[in-house]
């Protein structure tokens, strides 16, 4: 599943190759890819034709292309396997090509939405006064956003009866932090994933956010190598995941800080990876003890 850094790589690629081009025609090759556009594929294609695309924007894992001359935007859902490719017209059609966007100019390239598992797709939405597609107006800013309000985030953590990893994945509090980045940032912060957020001090919140940003920026630095390519690609696997992970996927391997074997625990249909020594489980009073140590 693509996380914020992968989506940001795609946004930068689209900025370079697609922004400010006028749509000539849209071809929808699979109805599932436009299922979030409730009026259907034909309507989607009709309403895009003739419009100029603005600068691509992102909030958390959400990516959209505003239309320059209306208060509408095309929202891209990458799902599990969605890819946005900029390809020469003559490039062979991908096996899982779902949507093709042709442009009026003579640059010789087109935008293709390719998605093997068809969890993703494109849809057109009205935008809010802030320029967000209305369906994601409730999504909080991400920690790389200069306008992210750290103080408000900390106050929300103190107020909420929740645990730290749940809070990191709560898109209404902070967006763009997925399971992998949460585990990495928690390991760096020496925080157990079940730590109640009400116990976090302001410096701890600041430290945690700093680690979240560092993990994301490290992933962005790796993904940056593909910016120069014509091929804009997201497949949920950046080189970063193979090389630089300290927690995620490291069950039974020695903690890179203390050597203790790392553990994995089921967590909300996913997994949490942590060091039992560096990230001790919180003591719980007046509530059932957590299953994990
Ligand atoms: Zn450790």
Image (cartoon, grey):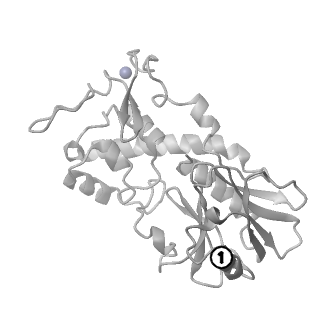
Q: Which quadrant of the view contains residue 186? A: top left
Residue 91 image position (x, y, % from top left) = 87, 55
The outermost residue toward the front is 31
Residue 283 image position (x, y, % from top left) = 17, 31
* For residue 175, side relative to residue 200 (left or right): right
**Residue 59 in the image: above or below residue 253:** below
* For residue 86, side relative to residue 2 (left or right): right
Q: Quadrant of the C terminus?
A: top left
Residue 211 image position (x, y, % from top left) = 42, 40
* For residue 56, side relative to residue 165 (left or right): right
Q: Residue at x 62, y 49 (%)?
A: 81
* For residue 208, side relative to residue 36 (left or right): left
Ligand 1 located in image quadrant: top left
The outermost residue toward the bottom is 69
Other-residue count near label 1 (Cα within 10 Å), few / some / many at <14 / 14–19 / ≥20: many
Q: How many marks?
A: 1
Front position in the image: 106 or 111? 111
Q: Which residue is mark 1?
A: 44
Q: Residue at x 20, y 50 (%)?
A: 161
Residue 41 image position (x, y, % from top left) = 66, 73
SS at mark 1 in the image? helix
Front position in the image: 67 or 213? 67
Front position in the image: 289 or 14? 289
């Amino acid at each position: 599943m693509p996380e914020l850094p992968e989506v940001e790589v795609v946004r930068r690629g689209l900025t370079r190759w697609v922004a400010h081009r006028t749509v000539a025609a849209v071809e929808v090759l699979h109805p599932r890819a436009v299922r979030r556009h409730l009026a259907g594929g034909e309507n989607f294609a009709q309403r895009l034709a003739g419009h100029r695309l603005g600068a691509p924007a992102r909030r958390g894992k959400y990516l959209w292309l505003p239309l320059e001359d209306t208060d509408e935007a095309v929202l891209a859902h990458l799902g599990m396997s969605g890819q946005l490719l900029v390809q020469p017209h003559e490039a062979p059609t991908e096996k899982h090509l779902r949507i093709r966007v042709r442009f009026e100019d003579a640059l010789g390239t087109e935008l293709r939405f390719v998605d093997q598992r068809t969890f993703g797709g494109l849809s057109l939405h009205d935008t809010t006064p802030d320029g967000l597609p209305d369906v994601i107006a409730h999504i909080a800013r991400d920690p790389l956003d200069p306008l992210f309000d750290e103080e408000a985030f900390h106050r929300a953590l103190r107020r909420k009866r929740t645990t730290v990893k749940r809070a990191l994945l709560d898109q209404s509090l902070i967006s763009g932090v997925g399971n992998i980045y949460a585990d990495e940032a928690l390991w760096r912060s020496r925080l157990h994933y079940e730590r109640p957020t009400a116990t976090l001090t302001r410096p701890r919140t600041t430290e945690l956010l700093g680690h979240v940003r560092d993990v994301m920026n490290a992933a962005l630095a790796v993904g940056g190598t593909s910016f120069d390519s014509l091929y804009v690609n997201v497949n949920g696997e950046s080189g970063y995941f193979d090389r630089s992970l300290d927690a995620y996927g490291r069950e039974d391997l020695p903690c890179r800080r203390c050597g203790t074997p790392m553990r994995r625990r089921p967590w909300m249909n996913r997994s949490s990876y942590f060091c039992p020594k560096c990230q001790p489980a919180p003591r719980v009073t007046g509530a059932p003890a957590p299953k994990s140590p």
